[in-house]
Image (cartoon, rainbow, N blue to C red):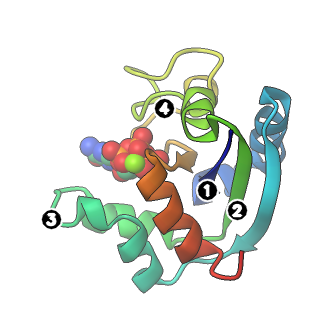
Amino acid sequence: MSERTLVLVKPDGVSRGLVGEVISRIERKGLTLAALELKTVERAVAEQHYAEHDGRPFFESLLEFITSGPVVALVAEGPRAISAFRQVAGGTDPVDKAVPGSIRGDFGLEVQYNLVHGSDSPESAEREIKLWFPNL
Ligand code: RTP
Ligand code: MG
C-alpha cells in the first residue's frame, strides 16, 4: 500500500544549499517524488500549514521564519511514506532528539532551524498536500 507525505525544505535548508541533499536522501530511502516546487510562502498559507501550533509561544517566530525565504515543497510517495520520511528527517530538536544519520541530526543545531518538515499523520498529509498542491 502506497502512501503520500508532504515534505518542506525550510528556508534554512534552501539557503544552506541542502535541497539536493534532502532530495537525495528521500530517493535513497526508496521513496519517489510525486510533485516538487520552489515557492515563497504567503503568511495565510503558513498559518494554515501550522494551524495546530496557533497560540504556542513559538508560533509567531515560526511563521516569520517559514515565510522568510523560498522553500521547496514536495510530495514523496511509497510504502509508509509518512513514517519513513519522519525517520529520514530525525526528531524535532536537531541535537537532543535527532540522531546522527538523519537530516536534522547531521545538519541542524537549533529547534527552529531544523531544515525540513514532514507530515505527521495520514490526516495531516491529506490536509497539507491539498494546501500546497491543490491540483495534485
Ligand atoms: P515539522 O512540523 O516542521 O515537521 O516539525 P515537527 O513535526 O518535528 O515538530 P512540531 O512539533 O510540529 O513543530 C513545528 C516546528 O515548530 C518549530 N518549533 N519551535 N520550542 C520551539 O521553539 C519550537 N518547537 C517547535 C520547529 O521548527 C518545528 O519543526
Ligand atoms: Mg509537525
Give the label, 2 or 4, closer to the camera.
Answer: 2
Residue 131 visible, this orientation: yes
Q: Where is residue 88 in the image (x, y as percent from the top left)?
A: 63, 29
- Judging by the rendered image, the residue that carries numbered circle 4 is 109
* Other residues around mark 1 within 10 Å, as few (<14) / some (14–19) / many (≥20): many
Label 2 close to label 4 by CB (< 8 Å): no
- Judging by the rendered image, the residue that carries numbered circle 3 is 55
Find out if the beta carbon at label 3 lies less than 8 Å from the nearest ligand 1 atom: no
Q: Distance between the residues labelled 1 and 3?
A: 22 Å
Marked residue nearer the N-terminal end (1 or 2): 1
Pick the front one: 29 or 72: 29
- Judging by the rendered image, the residue that carries numbered circle 2 is 72
- Judging by the rendered image, the residue that carries numbered circle 1 is 8
* Other residues around mark 2 within 10 Å, as few (<14) / some (14–19) / many (≥20): many
Residue drawn at x 78%, y 28% is 29
Residue 112 visible, this orientation: no
Looking at the picture, which amino acid does disc 1 mark?
A: Leu
Give the label, 1 or 4, closer to the camera.
Answer: 1
| 57 versus 70 height, above or below | above
Looking at the picture, which amino acid does disc 3 mark?
A: Gly
Marked residue nearer the N-terminal end (1 or 4): 1
Q: Distance between the residues labelled 4 and 3?
A: 24 Å
Looking at the picture, which amino acid does disc 4 mark?
A: Leu
Q: Where is residue 61 in the image (x, y as percent from the top left)?
A: 32, 63
| 59 versus 106 height, above or below | below
Q: In which quarter of the image is residue 82?
A: top right
Marked residue nearer the N-terminal end (4 or 3): 3
